[in-house]
Amino acid sequence: MSGEASLLAVLVCIAAASVMAAPVSQADVLLRFKAATRDDAGALSDWTSVSNAGPCLGGKEGNWTGVRCEDGKVIKLVLESMTLSGTLDTAALDGLPELRSLSLMNNSFKGSVPSLRNLPRLRSVYLAYNRLSGEIAADAFSGMDSLWAVHLEHNAITGPIPSSLAGLPNLAELSLQENEFTGALPEFRPGGGLKLNVSHNLLEGPIPASLTSIDASCFAGEKERADDYQCSLQLRCCRLLTKTLFFFSYSGRVGIGNKGLCGDALGVPCRANSDTSTKTSSTPLLVGIGVMVVVVVLAIAAAIFAALRRRRPSEEYQLGRPPSSARKKSASLDPNCLEQGCAGSSGKRKKAGGVSGGGGGGGREEEHGTQLVMVQEGRERFELQDLLRASAEVLGGGAFGSSYKAMLLEGPTMVVKRFREMNGVGKEEFQEHMRRLGRLSHPNLLPVVAYYYTNREKLLVTDYIPNGSLSHLLHGNYRSSDRPALDWATRLQILKAVAKGLLYLYRELPMLTAPHGHLKSSNVLLGDAMVPLLADYGLSPVVNPAHASDALVAYRSPEFLQHGRTTRKSDVWSFGILILEVLTGRDPERHVQRRRRRGESNGGSGSGSCSSNGAAELAAWVESLVREERAEELFDGAMEGTKNTRGEMMMLFQIGLACCEPDVGERWDVAEALRRIEELIEGEGVSSAVTQGDIP
């Protein structure tokens, strides 16, 4: 009997040991992670144990959302922008020993940054744009020698930067900006090549010698509230380095440095330890300065308010009112809105045999009146009063002012653009430049039809293009309409036509350094048969210089940011950015604005190679995709007609990168870009509903 009991005990122990030794399946590991995660949108609805289809049965792409596999093993987990939330707990992923990349960017995970030491093969970690907080354990990254990219930016992480992170032997990218890190920067391993960004934190102390080669903007930016300022984000430059894509972004606001950081990189000398008495003695002075600043700000605000009160009656006559989110888009232009400026206008319509009267003469225009000046010969003429009587619709506001759709009672539908910052030149120079623009004629230019000038009011009138802009088709909600997404052949032809229009501007406006000056997807309108029409070109000479540097896209080129000047290739840089936008379908400016509305971003600032805003973080993500051989994810997923065209799309990528090369001497000119695009089309034999003849 005792022998039977002993045998039974042995069998029980063997069974228990076998159960304990049985490996947990990858499906169970992922399901445990899902159970610990809040998924209100159902993004992980196909992660289920109901079927026998595991996460890797779909091959390299995986069978479950966001899962990438290799040889039946989960190697990448990419769960970005899925509105996932809850406390981040990666302990459940310890059962994925082959995991190399973990990306949970742009979600709403809370809690502290977990330890990932049990994932020894992990090479890249992307936890940016979440709501992580608290301190990171000093040994959180100990032993993770394979790790080369860590992105924790745009969270609320506190405490010192862990020394285990600084000691990683293969670390190449470390993005910690827009957090609340405190203390001194740790000493990083020497050797160079590290891409570091710690801007917009609460760091202090000297910058270590191992980091002196990094751009000062990567350390800049004192932590501020997101609503303390507004920033304008645009793609700044892109480059191909060792087969890697880089995007950088630019903001008009320059960071003022982490409070207390010092060193040669910032040009701030590090002083010896200051005693408490010195700090105490400076307190009354700081308080006094603070009081003075408050008084000055209140005085300025009172003066501005008084000026606006005085100015309001005289501005009631102006065309329309700026768009407001609280106001309906439909409006009516007041026929009496230009009582001073259009007293002599006539409501009669006639053919414009040339440039119509412009108010001429001396004296104050507001008293003597002025007319709408037609600059297109052969066009049916209309007067300012016709526009004022027209049914109007607010189209929106841009860098220069507001745009209105004016449906004339007896005539075509026009667009009236009301400019706020067009006092760069006097009246005669303004009129001459408008006549110069009126003489331009090309199938890919939206012609300037008329203009209106007073000291305080500048209007430009163009034709209304009902198809909208390239930006709208790339980023708008086209799936809710009958219009399909742009296919590969159409995008390629559009870019070719844009290059043709840009080349024409270079030839006809040789006096302008940047003949377009404001080339972007929202300024590429799509006419009949999807023929692109460049808009808002040639305005740099009449825009206030101070405003031009903030508003015009060409003034965000690398050469302007580095040397304070545009060149004859600044528009080519803008064209290169447009090519990348068309290929990827990504609009970084809107991307960042969405993060800010959700409270996941504090905005950005800075200049140089290390701007601290969402576009730069998106850029780092794109770079990582290429490094990880995931370039196929760069292309717009909505783009149709891409079968067997990967080679051609990569060639167009190369053209775009060559156009936005930061080194002006190495950057192509527009003629070369056009030639390469035409060779690509001819060599590819593009066949689509849009043929080469459809777009001039």
Image (tube, rainbow, N blue to C red):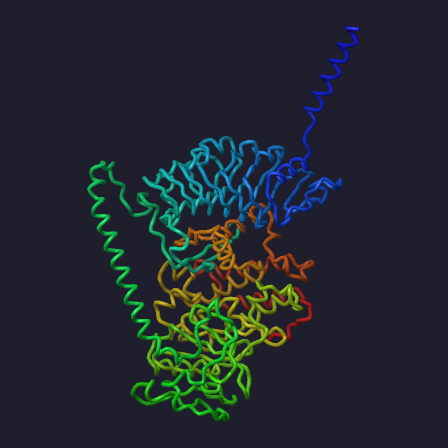
**Percent x, y of residue 353:** 48, 92
> Is 613 located above or below residue 302 in the figure?
above
Residue 238 in the image: state x and y as whole percent: 49, 56
**Residue placed farthest to the top in the image?**
2
Location of residue 476 by image quarter: bottom right
Residue at 52 percent across and 37 percent down: it is: 147
- Residue 19, horizontal then vertical, whole percent: 71, 24
Depth check: give the residue in front, 613 or 388: 388
Q: Residue 189, located in which quarter of the rendered image? A: top left
In screen coordinates, is 633 left or right of 178?
Answer: right
Residue located 55% across and 88% down the image: 410
Closer to the camera, 410 or 115?
Answer: 410
The mark tally for this picture is: 0
Q: Quadrant of residue 159?
A: top left
155 up-or-down from 408: above or below:
above
Seen at 44% across and 32% down, the residue is: 138
Q: Quadrant of the N terminus?
A: top right
Q: Position of residue 585 (x, y in %)?
A: 58, 60
Q: Is residue 301 left or right of residue 199?
A: left
Closer to us: 202 or 494: 202
Question: In the visual, does 339 lie left or right of 13?
Answer: left
Q: Quadrant of the C terminus?
A: bottom right
Nearer the observer, 116 or 335:
335
